Amino acid sequence: MTVFGDLRGRAASVVLGTLVCQLGLGFGYTLGALAPPILEDLGWTRVQWSGARAPQLFVLALASPPVGFLAARWGSRRVLLAAVVVLGVTFGLLSRMQTLGELYVLVGLMGLGLVGVGDVAAGQLVMNWVTRGRALALGIVYTGSNLGGFAFIGLATTVVEHASWREAYAALALVAFGLMLPVAALTLREHPTSPPGEGSESDEASAPAPRAGSDTSGVVTDGDLPLRAAVRTRSFWILGFSLFTFFFYFLGMLDHLVLFLTDAGMGLAEAGGWFRAAIGLGIVSKIGFGLLADRIPRKAALLLDYGLVAASSLLLFLLPGQPFLWVFVVVYGLGTAARDVVTPLIVGHCFGVRYMAEIYGALMLTLMLGGISGPLLAGWIHDRLGSYEVAFGVFAASNLVALVALAFVRRESLAR
């Protein structure tokens, strides 16, 4: 297998278009980066601010299974394009919001756009086009969230320094309609034939499976379990638990890292810079893990990733002192970003590629409980105790338990 595998011609164009759509995930990072000026301007508490994640994650979680269903039957291209439009409209409206109720409604609407450009539809489209070098292709596409986060945090904080957070959100709306939508419309295409099947531990074979929109009535083929069979396996529930703990920690830090650092005396620009660096490192992480996961067992890549996530949560107790802040940013940025790459790969490894989008979408229901409770818990603990230390302890313990549990994931089609 060459380094780039099938990444050429139309497949390369589709990967580029999917990457551009994934830039939209970077919009979500600007909520945490702009929290200080928004809270100061509108007078909301941290619990009220963190509560805005609840409607967003409610939509993200509940919409993930339908998005997987639509991606498999309606086509990923339509899902991705519609989601970009939703994001552009949302950020245009966010620039004009005045009340807490408006924030909650619009952040919920943002969730619909984020799940549409997210890993489920994007992963299905890329896995249909790329067999050789599939992990690398996924890694390249999933850098979109980090590229977007790095660029959009920088854009938003720069606009805030010269204007206000309202103009920053208006600028993001222009990016969605003026850049992302035209490029995606020109480059995205559905695969004309069947998608590749799941291969060996470190490389993929090319066993065919039905393309999006074809009959997927539930017949179990070798290496491919439908959703109703997958939910009866232990790996499905272990992966669901690990995703819960990941979102519990990841979303908690997204909302509170900049606030934690500004509490310690940093200016908004410096704190935002550290946050931006952590997101930007995901670019290196996803491509690096993509190359690595094409060459080592899927499970090994999964455990390595969650080991980094757990290590980053332990480093929280050493912050914000130097040089530990640098170490945390590197480990957190690498570990949390690589999760995007290893999750669709391990889902395909455990259950096969044919029903990957539907199974992955069902697993993403864990985003609702984990993603809502993590930010709320951290905000509630800070408001009561004036510190995040107890919240950091809960994050570290849950990540360590998930790491141990993932050692028991297996290829379920062979275990039957």
Image: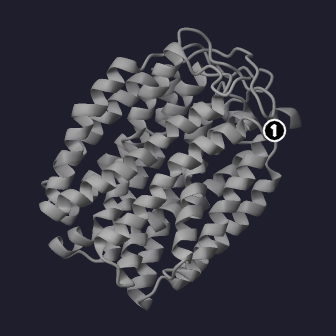
Give the residue type that dot 1 points to: Arg
Given residues 243 and 295, the one toward you in this image is 295
Vertical comparison of 402 with 4: above or below: below
Residue at the image point whose x is 42% and y is 53% from the top: 58
Q: Give the image location of residue 275, x and y in percent.
A: 42, 64
Residue at the image point whose x is 12% and y is 54% from the top: 96
Q: Give the image location of residue 187, x and y in percent.
A: 39, 19
Vertical comparison of 313 with 362: above or below: below
Please, which residue is most extreme toward the front here?
Answer: 323
Given residues 80 and 155, the one toward you in this image is 155
Name the residue carrying label 1.
411
Quadrant the C terminus occupies: top right
Residue at the image point whose x is 19% and y is 75% from the top: 40
Q: Secondary structure at mark 1?
A: loop
Please, which residue is most extreme toward the top here?
Answer: 192
Quadrant of the rendered image containing residue 126: top right
Drawn side of residue 179 relative to residue 404, left or right: left
Please tell me how crowded label 1 is: few (under 14), some (14-19), or many (20+) other residues with Cα within 10 Å. some
Given residues 358 and 30, the one toward you in this image is 30
Vertical comparison of 236 with 100: above or below: above
Quadrant the N terminus occupies: top right
Q: Give the image location of residue 121, x and y in percent.
A: 49, 32
